[in-house]
Structures are given as C-alpha cells and as structure tokens.
Image (cartoon, helix red, strand yellow):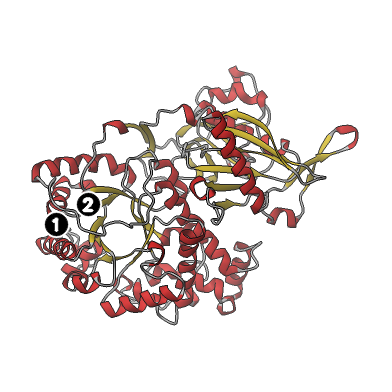
Amino acid sequence: MRESFFTLDPESGFPEVIVVSAAWGLGETVVSGQVDPDEHTVFKPSLKDPALNPVIDVRIGAKRKKAVYGQHGQTRSVDTTGEERSRYVPAGTEVRQLAEWAMTVEAHYGCPMDLEWAKDGLTGELAIVQARTETVQSRRRTTTLRRCRLTATPQQSLIEGTAVGEAIGSGPAVVLDSPVDLDRFPTGGVLVTGITDPDWEPVMKQASAIVTDHGGRTSHAAIVSRELGVPAVVGTGHATKVLRNGQKATVSCAEGSRGRVYAGLLAYEEQETDLSEIPATRTRVMLNLADPSAAFRWWRLPADGVGLARLEFIVAHQVKAHPMALLHPERLDRPDRCAIEQLTEGHLDRAQYFVDRLAHGVARVAASRWPDPVVVRTSDFKTNEYARLLGGRAFEPVEANPMSGWRGASRYYSDDYREGFALECRALRRVRDEMGLTNVIVMIPFCRNPEEADRVLDVMAEQGLRRGEHGLKVYVMAEIPSNIILAEEFARRFDGFSIGSNDLTQLTLGVDRDTETLAHVFVETDPAVMRSIRLLVLRAHSVGRSVGLCGQRPSDDPAFTEFLVSTGIDSISVAPDSFAAVKQHVVAAERDTHTENRPAPSGTWPEDVVTRER
C-alpha cells in the first residue's frame, strides 16, 4: 500500500488539515489515475489531543484495481475484491499515525509539505518514503482571494467527477486515447482522456481544462493541472464516451468538491479581492455556508465565523435519504428499499451511515472557521421537501401549506420524527465532543412558543446535548412574530437569536413568500418587519442575549444594512461572495450612525471557544 498526503488542503490551501489518501497495492495505479483512492481529512488542532478523533471527513474511493508484484520483479494490475473496495484504507489508527508524522515533518521544514507513505505488505510497518515542499498553494498570496463563478444558469451537467482547483475553463472537447503532436491539439481545447502520464504534459499545458475517466486528487492529471492552474475534473468514469470531439463544453471546478462539465460555452467571471483592504468592524460579519465541500475555499476571508450552516443541505446532498427511511426500511416499497440498500452499501448500521455523513459535513464547516463560532441550524425541511428525499414519501403527510406546517421544532419531539432528530443530535454531539469542534452552536428553527422550546431542549438533553454542558450554546431562529412578542421568555431558554428575515416577513405580513401574485407585498423593509427587528434587538440585549440576521437582503441593500447597524445588532451573516461588499456597507453604516461606543451584550459568544490566531 502506497500513497501521498499533504499538510494542507491541496485545492484551497486551507492550512489546518492534513489530507491522507490511499488505495490497495503499489502506488502506481493511483499516480497514473487508474484508481480513485480513499481520502481522510485530519484536523490539526484536534490531532494534538489524544482523547479526540481528529478525522473530520472520510471519502471512500472506488479502488477497483491494484498493482501487485508479478514474476521477475515486474508489476501487474489485478481487480480488487468487493471486501477491499468497501473497506477504508488505511485503518483509523494508521491515519492518526501518518498525520502525526506529517505534523512533525512540517514543523521540521517550517512549510507545508507534500509527502508519500507506504505500508509494508509483509510486516505491516508504515513508513514515510518521500518528503518535498508543497509548491502550489503555499506560493499563493494569502491576502488575495481569487474567485470564479458561472454567470449563466447551467442546464443539467453532462458528467461529474472530482474537482481539481477552483477555476472554470471552456472550449471544444478534444477526446484522445493517446498524446498527440502539439500542432494537432488546439490551444484552449478541453482535453478529454482516460488517464494521463508525463507524456501528456505538453498537451495539458495548452488545454483550457482537463477531464479524465479515472483518477483522484493525487493522480498525475490532478497534480499537473493543479501546478498549471488549469481546472480538471478527474474520475468521471466515462467522459470519453459521453463527450464528443468538437463539442463545446464548460468545465467548472468552482462549485465545491464536485467538478461538473456542462454543454456549451457558458459565461463566467473571475474576480480577485485584496483581503488586506477589508477593514475591521464592530458589527460581526459572518458567512452563510451551505455546501461543506466548498467550506475550505473561503478560509482566507476575514469573517467572524459562520452565522448559518443548514443541516438540510447536507442531508439532501450527502446523506440523500430520509432518516426515518434508514431506520425503518420495512415501511418502504421494494424500489425504495433496494435504493436504500444500494446507497448504504458497505454500512451495516444505516443509522451510523446517517450520523457519519452528517457529522463529516458539519465538521468540515466548523473546522474551516475554527475557533470562531459556527451556528448550525437543525433540519428545517418542509414536509413536501422531506417527501422528495429517498424513502421520504412513506413518512410525510401531504399538507396544503407546508411552509406553515409540520416543520422545525414541532418535528423534533413528535413520535413521527423523534428518532430522526436523535440522529441529528448524535452527529452534532460527535462533532463537538469526539472531534473537539466546540465552536459549533446549535440553532433551533421555527419554534412557535416557549413550551415547544422546553420540549425540544429536553429531547436534546436526552441525546447528550444539554445546553450549558461543555460550553454548548443553543440559539433559536427569530422568524415568527411570537419570537419577538415573547422575546424575554425565549431568552430564558436560548443563548441567542438569529433573525430569519424571509419567514419573519412572510408571517408578519401574512404573505406566502412563494406566491408571485403578492410579490409586491412581500417587502423585508416593511415598517412592521423593521420595527419587529429593532424591538427584538432591544429586548434581547436587555437580558444579555445576542441577535444576528442571516439573509440575502444586506447583500442587495446597503440601506437595510445601515438600518441593522443602527439597531445595534450583533452580527450580519451573508453569502461568501457578498462578504467584501457587505463589510464595506457595515463600515459606512457604523461611521454614519456613530455606533462605535455602544456596549456589547454579555454572553454573546461561547466562553469556552479557544481564541488563537488562525
């Protein structure tokens, strides 16, 4: 067994993790791109505590082949067994050992490292066999954030794979099974092939993007494209069969860990932000993060934490199944039962499958901003959205108005979902207590009255998430008029409020936010809504509770940002691509409204969160 590992995230340059990859057999199948290896992400701060599990993410690769020794010292490629494909490599204790060695090597050389390791097939001994300085991310300016994004709305992707880099490229597809002379490859073409090796490098330098059938993030194609700054989507499985010669295509690696190839030459933009020019503000400006796979890419932003991380995004995109369907497959029809079995292949305990996926997603987000606070909202699917999850139809009622129906807090203590919520609690407890990411704050959505709050907190305590223990803070979404009217009652039960301006507007004005006919009435700056926000801040601060707002409006409306700052609100949370603009709006608002000397409320952030320089 032989593979590589990095002392930073090789795509984003995030320095607080070690990424260990591995596959069966000799290392040549991985480097050549014949196999997609397993990948373990280890969080460095947690690695320092022997009592914690520092592995915050594990992704299992296909590992369909392995290189073994043949006769006369030669090697040959053979198929792996089903048991080998389903097993993680290396084992958990070995991941920790390798990560500890990597930390030691990095400390010795004083810079990020690109390492290779091996395991002796006879003795089982681990060894580091090569160490070199990492030469891509470590040379980037940490004060500059380069961002690409599609400005056109794409159709369904033609094919997907592992994203290498964070850029976008487009051009005519050039499907090849072997290298060609440079004059036969058009400059700016999209190279599409099975695997690459050093013979391909002259062609790769002329490509606008690279797409391969096989390989992972440490394959030859990934390594070279990363060094060239060329976006690559590797391990697609069958790109050479899907894409046609001359077909115009856009390759996007700007949407997280999944790279996508779209038909046509889609419009996109590239922006660079000088982070050294972003000023400090008294009002905290935080991030809304949905996709854990994209969390590391924003680590350079000088944000004050994450104001909203939504569990339902992780459930929909990484778990992909209704939690009750995993717990009670006997209530499913045959097609859904078969789909659940296929989805959870290799997991004997389907409840643990849910907990693992959810915990890894939350942990990536929490690690990306450590030690700053990360507010994680428990699931807030509506019944029609839950029903669309795999197996969900058997567990969800049909409601005439799901927006105001069985959602949020009311689900968590209900006999029809209590077991599902218990899995959410198990995942959050694992992130905080086992992985050591105590910067996670739990937030409860759509809590209609104080009695409901008590019932939810009791259920959480039963699952080992007791407010106040181990520094656990619990917030509540302020999105129902009752949350403002009874603010002091809610403040006795929760440590802070986060305003959900869309639902608050909807329920204050009695307007379905999805109804086009009444779109002209749905205005977040309506005096009734703004008065509710100001009143909540006043009441919460009077009893030492913090208030934030997470939503799109501050990004689009500087006047609304100025209003929020004038109320003395503690934080504003926005999408990452709006961060710099909103930060400037806050600077202007603080200057104009002279709020620099207002006192901050007590107990704003968790006292137990370690404060250290990033």
Using the numbered discs, state the Cα–Cα distance from disc 2 to disc 1 in whole angstroms: 9 Å
| Quadrant of image for the C terminus | top left
Disc 2 target residue: 553
Quadrant of image for the N terminus: top right
**Residue 101, above or below 518:** above
Looking at the rendered structure, the kind of residue marked 1 is: Thr
Residue 66 position within the rendered picture, expressed as x and y whole percent measured from the top left: 75, 44
Query: Does residue 350 sit above or below 163 in this rendering?
Result: below
For the image, the number of numbered tags is 2
**Residue for badge 1:** 525
- Left or right, 272 with respect to 41, comes to left
Residue 190 showing in the rendered view: no
In depth, the one of 344 and 563 nearer the eye is 563
Instruction: In the displayed orientation, state which residue is furthest to the top.
Output: 183
Question: What is the secondary structure assignment of the residue under circle 1?
Answer: loop
Q: Nearer the viewer, residue 45 or 8?
A: 45
Q: Is residue 151 left or right of residue 120?
A: left
Q: Classify mark 2: helix, strand or loop.
A: helix
**Residue 565 locus on image (x, y percent):** 15, 50
Quarter of image, res 327: bottom right
Residue type at mark 2 is Arg
Check the image and report above or below for 185 versus 558.
above
Can residue 269 be spotted in the picture? yes
Say which quarter of the image contains residue 168. Answer: top left
Q: Residue 601 appears in which quarter of the rendering?
A: bottom left
> Relative to residue 347, is residue 589 drawn left or right?
left
- As drawn, the label of residue 266 is none
Residue farthest right in this picture: 72
Whether the residues at callouts 2 and 1 have beta carbons within 8 Å, the answer is yes
Q: Residue at x 39, y 47 (%)?
A: 369
Q: Position of residue 27 (x, y in %)?
A: 72, 37
